[in-house]
Amino acid sequence: MIQIYRAKSKATDEWATGYLVKGYAGLRIDAFILPIKNISAYPSADLSRIWAEGIEVDASTICAYTGLADNLRCDIYEWDIVGGNDYIDGVFIVRFGWYFFRDSNYYGWYLDGKVQPTGEHTILPMTPNCHVIGNVFDSERATKALKIITREEIERANTLNFRELH
């Protein structure tokens, strides 16, 4: 399975979705996204045409696709803000990594947020039975209200790899 990503275009500040190219030798930009529709249109030997179709993106806004859609059939990505789920009513940020739930440790997608009406901080397993409200990169006010993550935490999370977690 090929992982799909989205990130903010440096040129337009709009979301670009597709295959992520980051740190490619000879590429003079931090990261770019090759739109999904273009990947099969070019033979693998024609890299110059593939690169021409790429969209330069802000590497700090890269979000991985969870493989899930919400109850309104909207794709759910890392760093999305979601509301309402199977477990409890609240507002949550979609995260990936190690989390603790019901006396056990898990590694995977989870929801990090606040329950309503108490505002208590809660971590829950990921569920598609929710709805996407926005994204932390588009909704800074909502993110600050949640007081869960900072911009530095997002940037650090984007630079971590699995080995650093152990």
Image (tube, grey):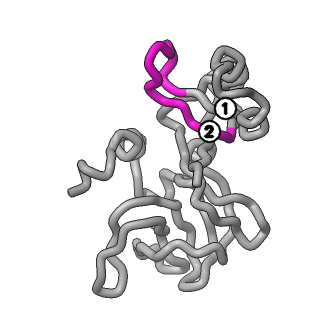
Q: State which quadrant residue 84 falls in.
A: bottom right
Q: Are marks 2 and 1 in contact (CB under 8 Å)?
A: yes
Q: Residue 54 or 39: which is nearer the viewer?
A: 39
Would residue 102 be counted in the magenta stretch? Answer: no
Q: Position of residue 30 (x, y in %)?
A: 48, 23
Residue at the spot of label 2: 19
Q: Position of residue 155 (x, y in %)?
A: 39, 39
Q: Position of residue 36 (x, y in %)?
A: 72, 40
Q: Residue 44 or 91: which is nearer the viewer?
A: 44
Q: Which residue is drawn at the image coordinates 25% and 50% (left, top)?
A: 163
Is the residue 26 above or below the residue 160 in the image? above
Query: How dense is the environment of label 2, judged by Cα within 10 Å: few (below 14), some, or many (20 and up)?
Result: some
Outermost residue, left side: 166
Say what amino acid the circle numbered 1 marks.
Leu
Which segment is the magenta one? 17-31
Say what amino acid the circle numbered 2 marks.
Tyr
Q: Residue 23 or 92: which is nearer the viewer?
A: 23
Q: Which residue is drawn at the image coordinates 70% and 58% (left, top)?
A: 75
Callout 1: helix, strand or loop? strand
Q: Position of residue 133 (x, y in %)?
A: 67, 60
Is the residue 111 above or below the residue 166 in the image? below
* Quadrant assignment for the C terminus: bottom left
Query: How dense is the environment of label 1, judged by Cα within 10 Å: few (below 14), some, or many (20 and up)?
Result: many
**Of the image marks 2 and 1, the number of the one nearer the N terminus:** 2
Callout 2: helix, strand or loop? strand
Residue at the spot of label 1: 34
Q: Is residue 71 left or right of residue 27?
A: right
Is the residue 59 above or below the residue 49 in the image? below
Alpha carbon of mark 2 to alpha carbon of mark 1: how far? 5 Å
Is the residue 103 above or below the residue 147 in the image? below
